[in-house]
Image (tube, helix red, strand yellow):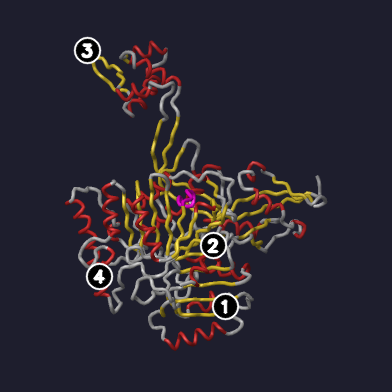
Amino acid sequence: MNHNIKKYTVAFPFKYSRAKFCIKKLSEWGVIDYVFLKELSLKNYSLQELCTYSNLEKQIVIQILLPMMKIGWIELLTNNSDFYFVITELGKIACKENKLPDKEEDYDRNRDFLIDFNNNYYGIQKLRLIPEVEVRINELQKTQNNFIKFTIPRFEVYPNYNLMYKAVEFNNEKIINILDDFHFGINDTKYILFDVHYNKSKNQVFFHDEELVSKFSKDVRDTISQFNFSEIKDKKLIRKDYNLPKFDFNSSYKFEIDNDSLDMVLGAKAHQEAVINLIKESDEYLIIHSTFIGKWCIKNKDNEYTNVFNELKNALKRNVNIYILWGKDEPDEFDDNFEKSKLEISDIEALLNEFNDKCIKDGILNTINFNNFSKTGSHTKFIISKTSKDVKLFFSSCNFLYTEYLRFESALLITDNTFIKNFLCIAADISSGKDLHSGSIRNDFIQFSKNIPDSLASSTNKIKVNLVLKYQHYDYIDLAKKTCRNRLYILSDKLNDVASRPIADALKNSSFKKYAFFSQRSEKFTPEMEKIFTQYLLKSPININLKLHNPKNRLETGKIPKKNHSKVLAWDNNNILITSLNWLSSNASKSPSSTDIYHEIGIYVEKRDIAKNFINTFNSL
């Protein structure tokens, strides 16, 4: 017995969840299936004749023919009290080639999966894994010597559906749809047990079950192998837990895309043109999510439909599937303006229904899907347009169906397939609203996502693009503090003092210049409060220069310049986060009761001069 070899059991943590999937299974027909169908294409056979022809028993022949009968390739006919197997027209088509088309079978199944600390997904059924719950691990820790427990931070992981599908699919399977959603993120933790042998004299680690550890990423193996086993006393209970590195905060939706697949769109008029072009270019489907909808965006002062709705009508004529999602929450019955808000919403819904009715009267049977006017509760603004050439995502600060295009807006136009595939899955969850209703729209969006091929690998210049969900926003304040060298800009539509802790305190003692702009005070935030808060921010060690945005350039002659509406975090030359979050008036801090992870969404970009160009444009207003 080698006394230098010590045996340990390592409990390694993973995030865990289960979901129900709609699955299509594809499998090949056998040679004998092809031979039988080909022979039936030449003549009709009775069961006995087929048995004689094939030298097989009746039961086996029936087992061969039954699946082909179920899909309509073969049918039974009677002749003189005898049954004959006859090929159908579909069967004749199927056996024209050198092999039969793959068999398809649809079914719903629950599948479990694990996610490691670097966001790799593992299908439990597919890999035949046996994860343990935390209660069981804690029991083992109390009773088993040389038992090492790693822990992972207790917070939600936001699902990457593409990775999830690939992890749970078996060979010859294809995930058609996911029947569950993850509005609340993935919270649970389960553990995989690894038996480890440690050679003390050589300081080497060996895994007892190499087949098991090889099912996981190299990161898992390396983390265990690099653990300091020498500090553990042999044959002792180990009360201490060992923390894994924190999840990379942007790991769930972190992408590298081609430089040419992302453009920034700035300004009101550029937004107006972009929206019209996205509608005109739409060929298969068009999705518009606007927080608010205004009557003036449907009909103008002359009671005629606006350019936007005229173009939507033209798209309907082209048989484009159009979805309009409305983000505004239903009015709160305890609000003083409840009756007024309820009436306004009712009037807008009536106008939108009237538009669909007018389309039908004009002979356009295709109409806009308004998601039954269910409000999503999301503050995010985006348009997804599937054109004849590609699919485009227009992600913006602009309320497309509420704006009069008089205020400065910021947007990103993205054409990267992989990024949009993932965004469409989030759009599907957003369409379910806070009440998590599951309807046909959600299923449509998931199917659209699945139909988009992944982006082709390219050696061209890559840029970093991260999708940022609500409770991840302040991580980028921390990132800015660590990486900013010269200047940082924060743009918000509204202002109150909610930013004092997550932004002001977080940026204390930083040496770069800090500027913050707002366009209006929040309700109940008085001028005196504004003055006190401005002075607070300006003092050391915070040193944030807060200003009311005061543009000089008029967008329309004779009209007062309209203030900024965009929500942006930008620093130095190459870092920008364009978002729906009002940085200076909305709270994106995580709390135990927080569930609305899609209420605010942003996109962070690292691209040469993108922040520089934004800041120069903004300062020129």
Q: Earlier in the sequence, mark 1 or mark 3?
A: 3
Q: Which residue is mark 1?
A: 505
x and y percentages locating residue 65 in the rendered image: 36, 22
x and y percentages locating residue 330 in the rendered image: 31, 68
Q: Which residue is mark 4?
A: 344
Q: Which residues are magenta?
A: 415-421
Q: Earlier in the sequence, mark 4 or mark 2?
A: 4
Q: Quadrant of residue 607?
A: bottom right
Amino acid type, residue under disc 4 in the picture:
Glu
The crowd level at tag 2 (other Cα within 10 Å; few <14, some 14-19, many 20+) is: some
Q: Earlier in the sequence, mark 1 or mark 4?
A: 4
Residue at image x 56%, y 55%?
463
x and y percentages locating residue 349 in the rendered image: 24, 63
Distance from disc 3 to disc 4, alpha carbons, whole Å, reads 74 Å
Amino acid type, residue under disc 1 in the picture:
Asp
Label at residue 80:
3
Amino acid type, residue under disc 2 in the picture:
Ile
Front one among 181 and 468 = 468
x and y percentages locating residue 421 in the rendered image: 45, 50
Q: Earlier in the sequence, mark 3 or mark 2?
A: 3
Front one among 48 and 460 = 460
The crowd level at tag 4 (other Cα within 10 Å; few <14, some 14-19, many 20+) is: some
Label at residue 610:
2
Left or right: 601 in relation to 48: right
Distance from disc 4 to disc 2, alpha carbons, whole Å, reads 40 Å
Q: Secondary structure at mark 4?
A: helix
Decide if residue 52 is in sight here.
Answer: yes
Left or right: 185 in relation to 134: left
Q: Secondary structure at mark 2?
A: helix
Label at residue 131:
none
- In the current view of this chain or complex, which residue is farthest to the bottom? 528
Decide if residue 591 is in sight here.
Answer: no
